[in-house]
């Protein structure tokens, strides 16, 4: 199954970092860290996402390079895409962003 990127409209979402960025581990036994096609470390950031109706979900977002955010920061997810995946009858949505910036920095950019 080829995954087609689905753009996410973040204009009506409140995104908050709830777990500090950390390198994404591919293999816990070997400690292998995920890298992108250029060899840069891929980080994983756990955020809470609240929609305009007050529904909240915890989501992990992948990003190349360590983003300048910390726990508690309101986050602007620039270029957020969702990818549907399926493995052995299970499925989900993986998220990836071009940048995760604190809202105060994103407003300045």
Image (cartoon, rainbow, N blue to C red):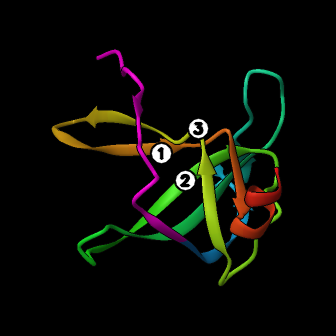
Quadrant assignment, res 86: top left
Look at discs 3 and 1 and give the one toward the viewer: 3
- Residue 109 image point, x, y percent: 82, 49
Q: SS class of the residue under badge 1?
A: strand
Q: Does 13 lie within the magenta span?
A: yes
Are circles 2 and 1 on residues that touch, CB within 8 Å?
A: yes
Q: Find the distance from the CA under tag 2 to the CA under tag 3.
A: 11 Å
- Which residue does the image show at 55% across and 67% down from the upper left? 46
Q: Quadrant of the N terminus?
A: top left
Nearer the observer, 49 or 95? 49
Task: Pick whichever of labels 3 and 1 is earlier in the sequence.
Answer: 3
Q: Residues within 10 Å of mark 2 (few under 14, many from 20)?
A: many
**Marker disc for residue 79:** 3
**Marker disc for residue 71:** none
Q: Main secondary structure of the magenta part?
A: loop
Residue denoted by label 2: 61
Residue denoted by label 1: 95
Q: Which residues are magenta?
A: 1-15
Nearer the observer, 20 or 78? 78
Is residue 75 visible in the rendered image? The answer is: yes
- Residue 73 image point, x, y percent: 68, 78
- Residue 23 image point, x, y percent: 73, 56
Q: Residues within 10 Å of mark 3 (few under 14, many from 20)?
A: some
Nearer the observer, 43 or 49? 49
């Amino acid at each position: 199954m080829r995954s087609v990127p689905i753009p996410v409209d973040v204009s009506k979402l409140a995104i908050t970092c709830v777990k500090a960025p950390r390198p994404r581990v591919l293999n816990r036994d070997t400690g292998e860290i995920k890298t992108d096609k250029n060899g840069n470390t891929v980080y994983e950031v756990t955020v809470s996402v609240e929609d305009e109706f007050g529904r909240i979900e915890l989501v992990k977002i992948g990003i190349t390079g360590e983003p300048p955010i910390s726990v508690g920061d309101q986050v602007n997810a620039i270029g957020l895409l969702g990818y549907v995946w399926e493995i052995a009858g299970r499925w989900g949505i993986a998220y990836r962003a071009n940048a995760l910036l604190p809202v105060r920095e994103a407003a300045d950019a």
